[in-house]
Image (spheres, rainbow, N blue to C red):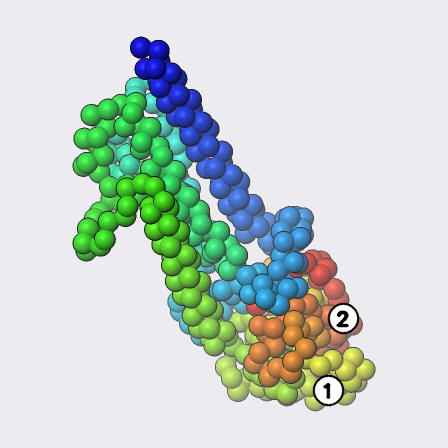
Amino acid sequence: MIDANIQMKTAATTIQHNDTLTKRTFWAALAFYVLIAFEFFYMASPFAVYFYAVYRPGLEFLNSTPALAWLSQIVLPHIVIETASPIVNAHNVVGSILAISGFIAFCVGAAQVYYHKLTRKGAVTGGIYNIIRHPQYASFAVCSFGLLLLWPRYIVLAAFVTLLFAYYLLARLEERECEQKFGQPYLEYKARTNMFLPFRIPGLDRLPAMPESGLKRGLAMLALYFAALGLSLGLAAALNVLTVKSLYATYTGNAAYISISKVTQPRLDQIVRIATASPDVQARLNNFNASAYLNYILPAEWHVSEIPMNPVDGYDGHHFPRNFNTDRFRVVFTSASLRTTKPVSADQILMQTEKRTPVVEAVVDLAQQRVVEIKDPHTTKYDDLPVPMY
């Protein structure tokens, strides 16, 4: 009898400990993605510099370490608003929809859980829980994926994959607790519902089963995690290649010219030719004498806060007026500090740039076929924070 009491107390303590661990891990994950959400919502506001600063130490370390620099880089465009790929162009819209809908579904699931806890009605098996057993984890994963599309760095992708596995382990832990607490009714509920998806994946039941417990299961989960991580990063790298190839850009000599909006190649080449033919621009570039340049082209009335350019009409954030002079373009010349000391071709400058230093701005008027305005360099409000390069 004494042994039985001890076992019951031990089991209760274990369950309480696991429940505490579950809650702590979940809220830590939530806090992580809240920070990412803040970055998205505030990136074009006066508060953006403070929220970028939250990530500064880690991003600076990754950005300045050649072997790890790829982790801080973005997969999809953040500055560029138009590319030649409809798939790439859709990521902000799709990301916003997923983030918002996932968050709403998460709140619905949370409301059900806390209602049952407050009213002491036992396990939640109705409503959204009648479709899947873990709607909160599933909806939070959807929300997180949406935020990943909005802030698409490799390091965030690695964290996302890691958290998916954490959700799975936490869900299994919670199910074991529910089986002990609610018994047969919960087992019957578990038998008629899926874990995270409202449908069965064809062929999944024919895959080799995971070991039930012990070291073998741990090793199998670890192998599956690294396989998923490798596959995800590989797909992201392929998407990144598509993104870079889809940019409206031109590369010449030791300079890369990136347009943030749609511009035909002949028109883009014409803008570059007129800008670089200006004696004033040439004098500035010759005085600077950089080994590589990363330059940006955008409508003269537009402004992007991550580009080291002068404010436009008082705007120093993201400013994209629809009605603008389609013959006037601003060319922002910046010196690119590269992560490597080896010579790189012009089309490699974008991916190898660690830091940019503004050199000069030129406003090109295509109707007049000349540079109509020269401006001194202007440091971005983010200073040397490692913001996205495209």
Residue in the foreground of this view, choosing between 184 and 108: 184
Amino acid under label 2? Pro
Give above or below for 39 relative to 329: above
Q: Is residue 315 left or right of residue 11?
A: right
Nearer to us in this view, 130 or 229 = 229
C-alpha separation, residue under disc 2 versus residue under disc 1: 16 Å
Q: Secondary structure at mark 2?
A: loop
Is tag 2's residue or tag 1's residue first in the polypeptide sequence?
1
x, y percentage for residue 183?
24, 24
Q: Which mark is residue 377?
A: 2
Which mark lies nearer to you, 2 or 1?
Answer: 2
**241 over 120 or under it: above or below:** below
Which quadrant does the N terminus fall into? top left
Image location of residue 294, percent across then percent down: 64, 75
Amino acid type at image mark 1: Ser
Q: Does residue 287 appear in this view?
A: yes
Residue 98, position in %: x, y?
Answer: 40, 50
Which residue is pictured at 66% across the width and 64% down the height? Answer: 64
Q: Quadrant of residue 335?
A: bottom right
* Residue at 43% in and 70% down: 238
The single residue placed furthest to the top in the displayed view is 1
Residue 314 seen in the figure: no
Disc 1 is placed on an element classified as: loop
| Residue corresponding to mark 1 | 278
Q: Position of residue 208 (x, y in %)?
A: 23, 53
Q: Is residue 184 left or right of residue 322?
A: left
